[in-house]
Image (spheres, coloured by chain):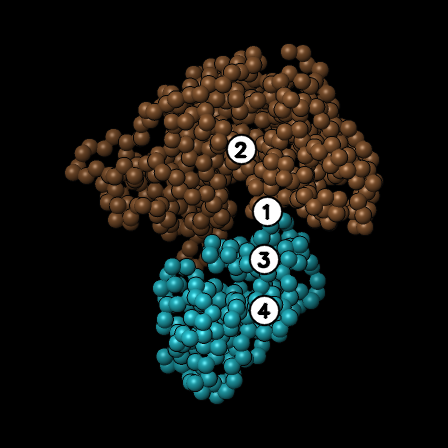
Chain colours: A cyan, B brown
Amino acid sequence: MKQPITHCVLCGVALTPVRSFSRLLLRTLPDVLCATCHATFEPAASKEAIFTYNEAMQAWLNQYKILGDVLLAYSFAKELHAALAKGDIVVPIPLHPNKLAQRTFSQVALLLDCAEVPYVHYLQKVQDVTQGLRTRTERVASTNPFAVAPNADVSGKCFVVFDDIKTTGTTLQQARACLAEAGAKSVKTFTLCASEIK
Amino acid sequence: MKRYRGYIPPAKLRDFYAGRLWDEARLPEGITQEEVARAKRAGYLQAHVAVDERCMRCGNTHIIAYDSYLYCRHCLTMGRLTNQTTLLTWQGQRPRFMRFSYNESSLSEAQASVSAALIASLQQKRSHLLDAVCGAGKTEMLFGAIAYALKRGLRVAVATPRADVVRELAPRLRHVFPSTCMHVLYGGVEKQAGCPQLIVATTHQLYHFYEAFDVMIVDEADAFPYTYDEALQRAVYQAKKPQAPIIFVTATPSKTLVAEARRNHYGHSSVWRRYHGFLLPEPRYSALFHYAKTLKKRLPKKLKDWTLERLKRNEPFLIFFPTKKLMHQALPYFTALDARIMSVHAEDEARAEKVQSLRDETCKGLLTTTILERGVTIKNVQVAVVGAEAAIFEASALIQISGRVGRNANYPNGDVVFFHHGITKAMDEARATIRKQNEVKQ
């Protein structure tokens, strides 16, 4: 994705880049969504997510993950960079190799790539399961599909596990447990969006 | 023609793939990967790389690169194509169509002469532009030409930019050509059996076809998004055989379309009278200044009176709004007048049912965005446009909206009112066009 993005990636409206000293000196990431499209995403109530899972986010995730519109990975680069670039080591939730072959890209790691957030693959997925296809009870009762990557030294380190969406939190809990058991000092979680239980 | 090499592909493969441009990985129902692979090896299916500098399906050249992939964003909603995707085209024998029956309906004199002109154009393999006022009976005029092509075993596509128009056309065509295999294609429709000789589809669905049709009919050729999306126009040309004629049908031909028709010596027919012979209802203006501000607090009096009048007379009505937001703002005031008033917009899944309920009179009136501006026929409907001065209401849109009224021979008149905050050129142009069409003697 070398081409500069000149139009809103969601609605195609021409973007008007704002020229400012802060942008020049601090090298902040450019906007790729127009103001109208950006306003359709609601900020999350909790501090462990940026957005609430609403209709706009559902459509966005569908276009990004299911249809495979990779360019959308830039959408929230600025927000993700601000939240994750400094601090604990970021560990993206990994994809199972089968799933990766099918999807052709790792949607979680790609979000971080585009946001210029450094991360390390301390985790790997050893069971090919998708939480979205299971019921709540199935999810809670399932065994941990994650394992610490071979040759990874986890002990005494502070981590932030990052995923694209949190629904029941099972995936994040399992990833956290996995790292904690291997001797991590602390494990926080962070997601792009979280569904709010009403 | 392929020589016999110890393998005959199953008929279901031919039925599906003939004329199609289809992603190899997306297997249609009832066809297995092995069957496709076998037909491919025998040369019955040809594989094409979907994306290189341009997308083979939509012709878009703005290709996005990531890692080792290239993909097309333009036709993403039809399923993503990358440089690793393979598209298949059918190389075997073309399907032959034998069955034909035609329930001919009686045509008025004007309709019959247009129908004859269309057939004459098809005989010469010449494209044709048919512009006929709203309610002139354009669809009926097409039947003769479609019958002419179907009878000769030709494949015909009737494409239109609006899914609503597809849903409206399909049952009528099915009734007229009962024994022809016809498929109706729009987003989300399920797979249909057999090999279609006649296809009624949205223009988007034509992305899935490649040099398939002998006759292409584009209905409502000036509707959004067809006029704005060059890729859709390419899709129309790609889906038909290179020499196949196109019939463009519209009530409001754009200047470019008329110019194109003249330049390429298309046949051209115009009809200025409705099929029942009555004049087109002329829109009237009614000032409704600062309606956007008023609608935040209450229903403007003129609009309220108009609606109450319709409710009193028990006439179904459509009220057009320039934006979804304004419509939703206004909806509660209308439901307060009568709970059986509903609203529709483009993303509304129950759109078709709501329009049907208006016909069945279980719904009193509909608030709508421009989505219902064309292709909708409701008996004795009355129409109001709120904010007719908005840019989205172009002259062609206003003509189409006015054309919803008085389509039924029993109710040839009705009210068309433009509520406005200032008169625009488009409004005057729409009214002047309708007046001019009414003055032409036939």
Seen at 60% across and 50% down, the residue is A11
Front position among marks 3 and 2: 2
> Which residue is nearer to you in this view: B105 or A23?
B105
Three-letter code, disc 4:
Ile
Q: Which residue is mark 4?
A: A197
Quadrant location of the C terminus of chain B?
top right
Q: What chain does mark 2 sit on?
A: B
Q: What chain does mark 1 sit on?
A: B
The answer to whether any part of residue B277 appears in the image is yes
> Which residue is nearer to you in this view: B194 or B267?
B194
Q: Which residue is mark 2?
A: B168
Mark earlier in primary sequence (2, 1): 2
- Discs 3 and 4 share one subunit: yes
Classify A29 as above or below B114.
Answer: below
Three-letter code, disc 1:
Asp
Q: Which residue is mark 3?
A: A55
Residue B354 pos. (x, y %): 60, 41
Q: Quadrant of residue A151 in the image?
A: bottom left
Q: CA distance from mark 3 to mark 1?
A: 14 Å
Q: CA distance from mark 3 to mark 4?
A: 15 Å
Three-letter code, disc 3:
Glu
SS at circle 1: loop
The answer to whether any part of residue B203 appears in the image is no
Seen at 68% across and 36% down, the residue is B318
Q: Are marks 3 and 4 in contact (CB under 8 Å)?
A: no
Classify B119 as above or below B348.
Answer: above
Seen at 60% across and 53% down, the residue is A8
SS at circle 4: loop
Q: How many marks?
A: 4
Q: Are marks 1 and 4 in contact (CB under 8 Å)?
A: no
Residue A170 pos. (x, y %): 48, 73
